[in-house]
Image: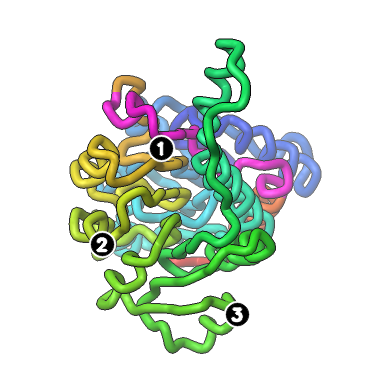
């Protein structure tokens, strides 16, 4: 079985999958390769399974290949043309963002929130300058954290934030859904009434899925609704935020700061103006990149590859 990683990002994914496949299927049964995104068109021609990572798998690429399975390393499939895959009879599957992956992302969110409130970049700069006792930080306890979207990652975040003594509120499509009770929120608002939640938010955490409907949904109106001096953390997808409105809110100081792990184009250009802002803490899409998360994802991906080999349907099939 020839397995193609579409792009050279997330190198630890290849190592974990190779180890998992060797342990489950034998050392010489599969070939794992990776290609640069510029050579993807040629590389898909002899692949049996492709793993998109952050590459766009469009209709032209699907028509060019003979692969039988598009298997995402994680949950997001917004870069895959599902209609084109359906027309060609190609299976598409993912690994739901739950378990160790959700827990890993939640831990990273806590890290970003505290780093913002304590102004970690300035702390590091002050150490280098020999300055003690500044900057003045802000406590997390007593602040209102709003979870924008209530999936498994938001639930893991809620579990970790509650012991800090925060007030948790949420925004979701159906605030009356049975699952909402599991989050133990002080209040939950519908998307249509999101301004009421945003108006009382100190830290906004984006947890939504990326779809055509949610692209750019965190827009100028959302930033106007947030109180001056609030913070934003995004471990979900960059495209959920309107770039121009976001930059303006940060530049003006209306947003006190932002913690970003995902971007509008990935990898983000080192020259992007967002990264030059002093109130932005950026990490390289590593919220879910941990030992336990990758072990769990690798096992799920390897299992689906083995199921394909045996003529079985993949688990978590989307198309």
**Separation (CA) of disc 2 from disc 3:** 27 Å
Percent coordinates x, y for residue 223 in the rendering: 26, 54
**Separation (CA) of disc 1 from disc 2:** 46 Å
In the picture, measured across the screen, residue 271 lies left or right of residue 25, that is left
In the picture, measured across the screen, residue 238 lies left or right of residue 296, that is left
Please give the name of the residue rendered at 31% of the width and 73% of the height, measured from the top-left corner: 196
Compared with 198, 137 (above or below) is above
Q: Is mark 1 on a helix, strand or loop?
A: helix
If you read the primary sequence from the N terminus, does the residue marked by circle 3 or circle 1 appear first?
1
Q: Quadrant of the C terminus?
A: bottom left
Stretch in magenta? 272-295
Percent coordinates x, y for residue 209 in the rendering: 40, 61
If you read the primary sequence from the N terminus, does the residue marked by circle 2 or circle 3 appear first?
3
Residue density around tag 2, few if under 14, some if 14–19, many if 20 or more, within 10 Å? some
For disc 2, the marked residue is 225
Q: Is residue 27 magenta?
A: no
In the picture, measured across the screen, residue 149 lies left or right of residue 294, that is left
Q: In which quarter of the image is the N terminus?
A: top right
For disc 1, the marked residue is 44
Query: Picture quarter containing residue 291?
Result: top right
For disc 3, the marked residue is 182
Please give the name of the residue rendered at 69% of the width and 38% of the height, measured from the top-left corner: 16
Compared with 2, 81 (above or below) is below
Residue density around tag 3, few if under 14, some if 14–19, many if 20 or more, within 10 Å? few
Please give the name of the residue rendered at 32% of the width and 45% of the height, measured from the top-left corner: 255
């Amino acid at each position: 079985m020839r397995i193609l990683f579409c792009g050279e990002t997330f190198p630890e994914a290849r190592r974990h999958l190779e180890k998992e496949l060797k342990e489950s299927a034998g050392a010489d049964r599969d070939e794992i390769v990776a290609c640069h995104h510029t050579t993807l068109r040629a590389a898909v021609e002899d692949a049996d399974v492709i793993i998109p990572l952050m590459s766009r798998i469009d209709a032209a690429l699907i028509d060019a290949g003979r692969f039988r399975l598009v298997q995402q390393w994680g949950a997001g499939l917004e870069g895959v043309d599902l209609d084109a895959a359906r027309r060609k009879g190609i299976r598409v599957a993912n690994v739901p963002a739950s378990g160790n992956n959700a827990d890993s992302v939640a831990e990273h969110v806590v890290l970003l929130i505290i780093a913002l409130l304590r102004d970690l970049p300035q702390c590091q700069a002050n150490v280098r300058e020999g300055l003690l006792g500044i900057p003045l930080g802000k406590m997390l306890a007593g602040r209102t954290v709003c979870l924008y979207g209530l999936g498994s990652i938001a639930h893991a975040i809620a579990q970790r934030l509650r012991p800090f003594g925060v007030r948790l509120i949420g925004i979701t499509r159906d605030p009356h859904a049975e699952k909402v009770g599991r989050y133990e929120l002080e209040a939950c608002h519908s998307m249509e009434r999101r301004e009421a939640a945003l108006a009382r938010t100190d830290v906004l955490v984006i947890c939504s899925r990326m779809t055509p409907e949610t692209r750019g949904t965190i827009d100028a109106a959302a930033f106007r609704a947030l109180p001056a001096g609030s913070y934003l953390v995004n471990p979900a997808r960059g495209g959920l935020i309107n770039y121009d409105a976001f930059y303006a809110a940060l530049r003006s100081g209306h947003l006190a700061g932002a913690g970003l792990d995902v971007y509008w184009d990935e990898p983000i250009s080192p020259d992007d103006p967002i990264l030059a802002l002093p109130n932005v803490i950026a990490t390289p899409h590593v919220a879910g990149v941990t030992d336990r998360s990758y072990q769990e994802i690798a096992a799920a991906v390897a299992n689906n590859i083995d199921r394909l080999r045996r003529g079985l349907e993949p688990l978590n099939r989307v198309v």
